[in-house]
């Protein structure tokens, strides 16, 4: 267990509300991007293929296919540079890390749908 | 210069104002009672003696107990002096408490601690020597210190080894000062200092935190 005082410091900079999502889910992540002195929100959507770490240092990896090229981005879950995390679709995953998706292309990267009350299908 | 005594709680990460992840060390500091005020008249120099962390009552020795009683407090495990400059207008008296709130205006701090003991270490780890190649015919001396001295290194006396020659030996467990840590935040309620970067010593070891000398 983590030291209570350390936890206290972490809790202050942690986000209070993180939407529920699992590995295999499709999410939309709003990333804040600094352009000059303006802040713009860019949406990156894809499949969550891994969640790692705990507490303040927890991260998740989102993979998507852009122009037939796989693109992965890894986000710290409590980052202040993330505007929102929106679960869009739940996918059935039978393991904790979906790195096998990297070897697949086309239809094979699709995961079967899993019913979940946490995701909102658009 | 202001000073407080504390204990290393551990490290974590927080985000700074610019949205950058910052590695921080959390230190539980004070409140430290002033156990004794040293003056030029009686001691030849000005200082405040601070104490931190109570000793278990069954283990307290009588002299330590009596000394702490003058400050109306229990005997302390960690006692260090806060040296005052000649003109320092300190008004703290014996028995007064020093809390983290004194760091409210401070931006940078120095931290003094005892580094983690590493045991007996070779010259590569202890003094950053280069060692020798691991291949190309090198035999049995990959991490060796090399030549200790030449015949002429101590003129007229032959090849004596000079004092201070860096060799293998005990490493760590030294008093180490790390300077100019940014003070990220303070928590007056829980007596916490949140300092950027790593500080010497293991989790749970005692440290001295003072305002940075080069920023005052």
Image: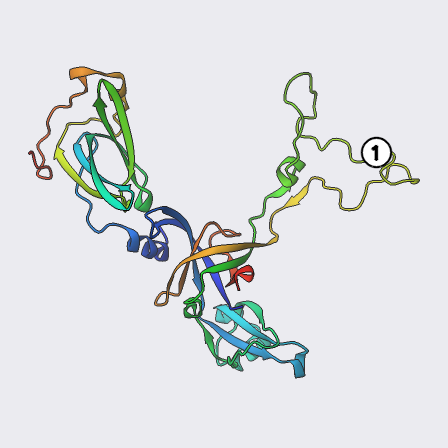
In the image, residue B112 sits, relative to residue B154, either above or below, namely below
In the depicted structure, whether residue B32 falls above or below residue A98 = below
Q: Considering the image in quadrants, where does the N terminus of chain B appear?
A: bottom right
Pointer 1 indicates a residue of which chain? B
- The answer to whether residue B55 is visible is no
The residue drawn where x is 69% and y is 20% is B138
Q: Position of residue A53 (x, y in %)?
A: 32, 39
- Percent position (x, y) of residue B146? 74, 31
Residue A104 shown left or right of residue B194 in the figure = left
Extreme-left residue of the structure: A122
**Residue visible at 52% across and 76% down?**
B34
Q: Is residue A88 left or right of residue B5?
A: left
Above or below: residue B205 compared with residue B85:
above
Where does residue A64 sit, x and y in percent of width and height?
A: 22, 26
- Residue in the foreground of this view, choosing between B209 and B55: B209
Residue highlighted by disc 1: B150
Is residue A9 something one can see in this rendering? yes
Foreground of the two, A79 or B34: A79
Vertical placement of residue A7 versus B52, above or below: above
> Who is closer to the viewer here, A80 or B209?
A80
Residue B17, horizontal then vertical, whole percent = 33, 53
Q: Residue at x 63, y 37 (%)?
A: B128
Instruction: Identify which residue is drawn at 65% across, 80% down.
Output: B40
Task: Say what secondary structure mark 1 lies in.
Answer: loop
């Amino acid at each position: 267990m983590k030291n209570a005082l350390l936890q206290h410091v972490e809790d202050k900079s942690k986000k209070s509300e993180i939407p529920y999502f699992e590995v295999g889910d499709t999410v939309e992540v709003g990333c804040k991007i600094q352009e000059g002195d303006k802040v713009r929100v860019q949406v990156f959507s894809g499949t969550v293929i891994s969640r790692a770490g705990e507490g303040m240092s927890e991260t998740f990896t989102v993979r998507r296919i852009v122009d037939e090229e796989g693109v992965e981005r890894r986000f710290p879950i409590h980052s202040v540079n993330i505007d929102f995390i929106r679960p869009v679709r739940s996918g059935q995953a039978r393991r904790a890390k979906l790195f096998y998706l990297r070897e697949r292309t086309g239809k094979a990267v699709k995961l079967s749908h899993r019913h979940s009350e946490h995701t909102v299908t658009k | 210069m202001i000073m407080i005594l504390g204990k290393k709680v551990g490290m974590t990460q927080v985000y700074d104002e610019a949205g950058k992840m910052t590695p921080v060390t959390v230190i539980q500091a004070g409140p430290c009672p002033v156990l004794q005020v040293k003056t030029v008249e009686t001691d030849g120099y000005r200082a405040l003696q601070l104490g931190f962390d109570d000793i278990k009552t069954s283990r307290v020795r009588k002299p330590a107990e009596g000394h702490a009683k003058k400050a109306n407090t229990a005997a302390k495990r960690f006692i260090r002096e806060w040296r005052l400059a000649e003109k320092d207008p300190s008004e703290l008296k014996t028995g007064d408490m020093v809390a983290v709130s004194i760091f409210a205006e401070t931006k940078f701090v120095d931290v003094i601690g005892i580094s983690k003991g590493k045991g007996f270490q070779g010259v590569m780890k202890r003094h950053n020597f280069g060692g020798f190649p691991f291949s190309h015919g090198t035999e049995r001396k990959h991490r060796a210190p090399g030549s200790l001295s030449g015949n002429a290194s101590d003129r007229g006396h032959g090849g004596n080894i000079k004092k201070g020659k860096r060799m293998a030996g005990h490493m760590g467990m030294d008093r180490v000062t790390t300077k100019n840590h940014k003070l990220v935040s303070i928590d007056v309620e829980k007596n916490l200092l949140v300092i950027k970067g790593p500080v010497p010593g293991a989790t749970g070891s005692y440290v001295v935190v003072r305002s940075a000398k080069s920023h005052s």
